């Protein structure tokens, strides 16, 4: 994902802002990292450049 | 009804698993955009943010990328998003891909100028979650959207139909190349019911029609 995508993203649960922590980048693209809700603290992973913003109860804990 | 894992066939997590399983084959068979979507987007240009809810392999996201500064492809299945990502690299267009549940969109209110939500809302398990999802579309939308769902008017459902068909729940098999079949949950919409759900979600219906066995509506928030 590109960093400015944050301008339109929010927490799927309470719709508050997300904070980005990038752990792996490729130029403009964030490949791996975490998006954390500034309100409820729920953390959403970014894997292979794609944020997983499924509600936590629908998220698979381990990759298939 | 439950599958081998004991999961209800309506469970969104099951729908997610099913599309993860059939993603490659499904994506191969979904090469072309629907003419109804092309017609809706005809004349749309210079939009800021365009959203494709239930983007699958990205066949409609590619059209959105042509008419907006930022196209967003949204799907519950990571495997389908991977096919969209591959298609993007192959065909040279760009969109942001997001994994999520259509019933709780991770997007800010009124940030979307144009949206397509086709052949997806019928996979949500009950009226409550379908209307909640449409309400989410209304929340994020600051422009127009095209929504579609499988219709009782489709030839396939004639046995259920008649002159005043009612919507119903069913499962539809997907047959993989090896012959294995995977069931997918659908709510088949009667056209009147489809419009009623859109209105219940707070969407204004500019135009509603049935085409190729699908209910369609052009809506705004």
Image (spheres, rainbow, N blue to C red):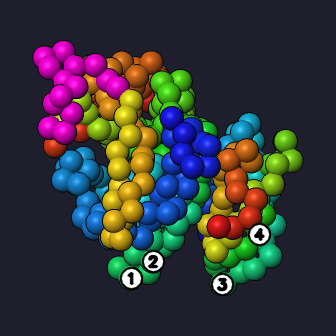
Say what secondary structure mark 1 lies in: helix
Residue at 39% over, 62% down: B180
Q: Is residue B221 magenta?
A: no
Does B71 sit above or below residue B210? below
**Which numbered dot is residue A27?**
3
Local packing at callout 2 (Cα closer than 10 Å; few below 14, some 14-19, many 20+) is some
The residue indicated by pointer 4 is: A33
User: Which x, y percent locates residue A31?
Assistant: 68, 76
The residue indicated by pointer 2 is: B86
**Chain-order first, disc 4 or disc 3:** 3
Magenta segment: B155-168
User: Which x, y percent locates residue A13?
Assistant: 72, 39
> Subunit of mark 1?
B
The residue indicated by pointer 1 is: B90
Q: Which residue lies most toward the top here?
A: B164
Of tags 4 and 3, the one toward the viewer is 4
Q: Distance of mark 4 from mark 3, alpha carbons?
A: 14 Å
Q: Distance of mark 1 from mark 4, alpha carbons?
A: 25 Å
**Which numbered dot is residue B122?**
none
Does B155 sit above or below residue B62? above
Q: Are marks 4 and 2 in contact (CB under 8 Å)?
A: no
> Subunit of mark 3?
A
Q: Distance of mark 4 from mark 2, alpha carbons?
A: 21 Å
**Circles 1 and 3 on the same chain:** no
Local packing at callout 3 (Cα closer than 10 Å; few below 14, some 14-19, many 20+) is few
Q: Are marks 1 and 2 in contact (CB under 8 Å)?
A: yes
Residue at 74% over, 64% down: A62
> Subunit of mark 4?
A
Local packing at callout 1 (Cα closer than 10 Å; few below 14, some 14-19, many 20+) is few
User: Which x, y percent locates residue B133?
Assistant: 52, 34
Q: Is residue B166 magenta?
A: yes
């Amino acid at each position: 994902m590109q960093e400015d995508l944050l301008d339109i993203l929010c927490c799927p649960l309470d719709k508050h802002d997300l904070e980005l922590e990038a752990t792996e980048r490729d130029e403009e693209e964030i490949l791996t990292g975490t998006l954390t809700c500034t309100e409820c603290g729920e953390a959403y992973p970014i894997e292979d450049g794609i944020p997983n913003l499924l509600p936590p109860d629908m998220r698979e804990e381990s990759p298939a | 009804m439950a599958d081998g894992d004991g999961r209800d066939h309506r469970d969104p997590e099951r729908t997610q698993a099913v599309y993860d399983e059939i993603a490659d084959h499904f994506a191969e068979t979904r090469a072309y955009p629907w003419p109804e979507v092309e017609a809706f987007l005809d004349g749309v240009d210079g939009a800021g943010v365009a959203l494709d809810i239930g983007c699958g392999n990205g066949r409609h996201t590619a059209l959105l990328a042509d008419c907006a500064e930022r196209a967003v492809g949204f799907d519950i299945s990571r495997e389908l998003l991977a096919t969209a990502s591959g298609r993007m690299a192959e065909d040279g267009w760009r969109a942001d891909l997001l994994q999520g549940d259509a019933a709780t969109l991770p997007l800010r209110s009124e940030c979307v100028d144009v949206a397509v939500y086709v052949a997806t809302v019928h996979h949500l398990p009950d009226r409550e979650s379908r209307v909640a999802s449409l309400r989410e579309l209304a929340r994020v939308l600051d422009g127009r959207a095209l929504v579609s769902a499988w219709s009782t008017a489709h030839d396939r459902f004639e046995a259920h139909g008649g002159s005043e068909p009612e919507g119903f729940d069913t499962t539809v098999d997907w047959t993989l190349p090896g012959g294995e079949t995977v069931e997918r949950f659908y709510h088949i919409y009667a056209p009147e019911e489809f419009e009623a759900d859109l209105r219940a979600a707070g969407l204004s219906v500019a135009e509603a029609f049935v085409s190729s066995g699908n209910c369609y509506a052009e809506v705004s928030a």
